[in-house]
Amino acid sequence: MGKRIISGIVIIGLLVAMLVLQGVYLKVGVVLIGLFCQYEMLHTIRQSGTKTMGLPVYLCALAMFPAYYYFGAEGVLFTYAITLMLLFMARTLCSRYDYKSVAYSALSLLYPQLFMVFFYKIVCVEDAHASLMMIVLSIVAASSSDTFAYFVGKAMGKRKLCPAISPNKTVEGAIGGLLGGTVLTGVAALIFGETAIPLYGYFLLGALLAALSQFGDLASSLTKRFFGVKDFGKLIPGHGGMLDRVCSIIFVLPVTLLFFRIFYGI
């Protein structure tokens, strides 16, 4: 428990520092988080006994960020298409790889890397206030949902939510997480002093993001269970890997960006 608390404090400190400094520090931070997550996903796949094609995957994971910055969504699609060609070429020329290697290597670039591209897009928004608000609302919704789900589930949980995927999660905890995420996201928007839409719109956004964050957590559990691992890594003492920490947040990022694009014209 002590390691978990200390690690949590360090993570919060680093996150606050990146958000305060913003600019290139925040962009570099997001890229590094994405690369760490990519490494952990490939390592998880390899632990199941399947070989992965590391070099083209890492090159693609790194190239996706500048490709999106300079060319938008088309840049990401071109990068992914070229990487798929390289993966199939490697399978054709090297017998040590099978079709499963191609499929899992390609999939690892969709989860989690494609979600990280949305994070990078958010930090690259020219309106610094809107960019910061998107990040904060996403983190608040996901973190508060996770926290409330844990404590409510521990105190009141009786009915299992998805026992085949995550035995410890309960229906009561999920409801608590949904309510907690909804309220705190609305409060965070109120603190920002936003009036672009009625305040209830942010509470509705909070409810949606809180629900998505729980699905992100379940998707993470499903992936780990499929590959037979407890955590994606050991980078953060008491918390597992980087992907274990951001799995719920990355699920809410596309919806947060879509929300701001509709109502703020970003």
Image (cartoon, grey):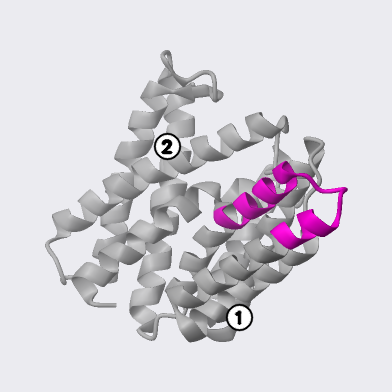
Query: Which residue is at the far top?
Result: 158
Residue 61: horizontal and vertical position, in percent? Answer: 65, 67
Instruction: Name the mark on residue 148.
Output: 2
- Which numbered mark, 2 or 1, is in the foreground of this view? 1
Quadrant of the frame with the N terminus: top right
Instruction: Name the mark on residue 229.
Output: none
Front one among 194 and 228: 228
The quadrant holding residue 54 is bottom right
Q: CA distance from mark 2 to mark 1?
A: 31 Å
Within 10 angstroms of label 2, few (less than 14), some, or many (20 or more) residues?
A: many
| Residue drawn 86% across the image and 55% down it | 94
Residue 221: horizontal and vertical position, in percent? Answer: 58, 34
**Magenta-tinted stretch:** 88-110
Residue type at mark 1: give it. Answer: Tyr
Within 10 angstroms of label 1, few (less than 14), some, or many (20 or more) residues?
A: some
Q: Give above or below for 12 relative to 207.
A: below
Residue 189: horizontal and vertical position, in percent? Answer: 27, 63
Residue 226 visible within the image: yes
Q: Give above or below for 32 relative to 138.
A: below
Q: Give above or below for 26 relative to 42.
A: below
Sequence-earlier tag: 2 or 1: 1
Q: Give above or below for 199 relative to 157.
A: below
Q: Mark 2 touching mark 1, by CB under 8 A?
A: no
